[in-house]
Image (cartoon, rainbow, N blue to C red):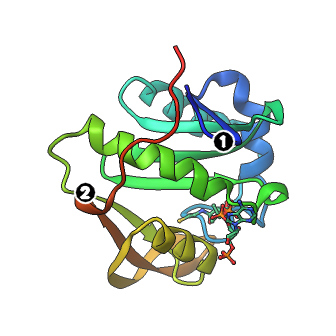
């Protein structure tokens, strides 16, 4: 578990299913995701099962608010060693939580994989909130590609961003226990 000023970052568990489904079934949160909003809890359960299985080796966390613990409001981290991903419930957007979470997680992801030269992100170019977030975290634009994902019959493009190890800061948040 990691504590930041306002957040609790902790490993995923199956009990998070309904909170995660609330987020991943919301068309606003899933607008630029690589697959469609989850229609049923079975789809989220498959996704969460993968997250829980990856817990020992993944630098990926469920996010709760320290002011209102017990409800997962998002998830953030490296879903594979060299690629970051994140999603938060629209209720909590615009408060700096994604930035706060990733500022704590990214240095740990580099520390966990000492030979990793950079952490990357693949973003729909229309997702300006995500691109701005990554740029604030120090990511640099590396390239773009067309027709990278087909979501419900519509092809979308990608921009690729990268955070070189040298631009990542040292861990600042406390790790209790
Ligand atoms: C992309 C996403 C994670 C951003 O989450 P967020 O929590 O709103 O992002 P941030 O925490 O960085 O903050 C966003 C805004 O809050 C502002 N902010 C930062 N710190 C703040 C603070 N302490 N208090 C208040 N506001 C703050 C920022 O200035 C930023 O505004 P700007 O974008 O106009 O510059 C969120 O929109 C999301 O979940 N989208 C859906 C999923 C998705 O698209 N994921 C990415 C796939 S690649």
Of 45 and 1, the residue lying toward us: 1
- Give the side of residue 105 with respect to residue 167, left or right: right
> Helix or strand or loop: what does disc 2 sit on?
helix
Image point (37%, 39%), residue name: 108
Q: Position of residue 154 (x, y in %)?
A: 59, 80
Q: Quadrant of the N terminus?
A: top right
Residue 56 in percent (x, y) is at 40, 23
Give the farthest residue toward the top.
177
Is 92 left, or right, of 114 in this rendering?
right
In the displayed structure, 29 sits above or below 110; it is: below
Which residue does the numbered mark 2 point to in the structure image? 165
How far from the left and from the top, in percent, is residue 132? 55, 76
Instruction: Give me the disc on residue 5.
Output: 1
Q: Is residue 122 visible?
A: yes
Residue drawn at x 32%, y 68% as measured from the top left: 162
Residue 79, horizontal then vertical, whole percent: 43, 45
Q: Is disc 1 surrounded by few (<14), some (14 to 19) or many (20+) residues within 10 Å?
A: few
Mark 2 and mark 1: Cα distance apart in space = 24 Å
Residue 36, above or below 124 = above
- What's the residue at 41%, 49% (across, down)? 106
Ligand 1 found in image quarter:
bottom right
Of residues 41 and 173, the one nearer the viewer is 173
The earlier-in-sequence mark between 2 and 1 is 1
């Amino acid at each position: 578990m990691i504590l930041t000023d306002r957040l609790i970052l902790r490993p995923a568990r199956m009990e998070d299913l309904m909170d995660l489904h609330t987020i991943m079934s919301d068309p606003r949160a899933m607008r630029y995701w690589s697959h469609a909003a989850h229609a049923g809890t079975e789809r989220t359960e498959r996704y969460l099962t993968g997250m829980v299985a990856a817990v020992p080796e993944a630098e990926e966390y469920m996010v709760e608010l320290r002011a209102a613990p017990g409800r997962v409001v998002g998830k953030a981290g490296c879903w594979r060693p060299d690629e970051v991903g994140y999603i938060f419930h629209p209720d909590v957007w615009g408060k700096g939580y994604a930035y706060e979470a990733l500022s704590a997680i990214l240095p740990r992801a580099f520390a966990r994989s000492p030979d990793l030269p950079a952490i990357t992100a693949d973003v729909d170019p229309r997702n300006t909130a995500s691109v701005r977030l990554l740029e604030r975290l120090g990511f640099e634009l590396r390239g773009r590609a067309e027709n990278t994902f087909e979501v419900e019959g519509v092809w979308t493009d990608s921009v690729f961003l990268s955070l070189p190890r040298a631009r990542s800061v040292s861990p600042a948040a406390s790790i209790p226990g």
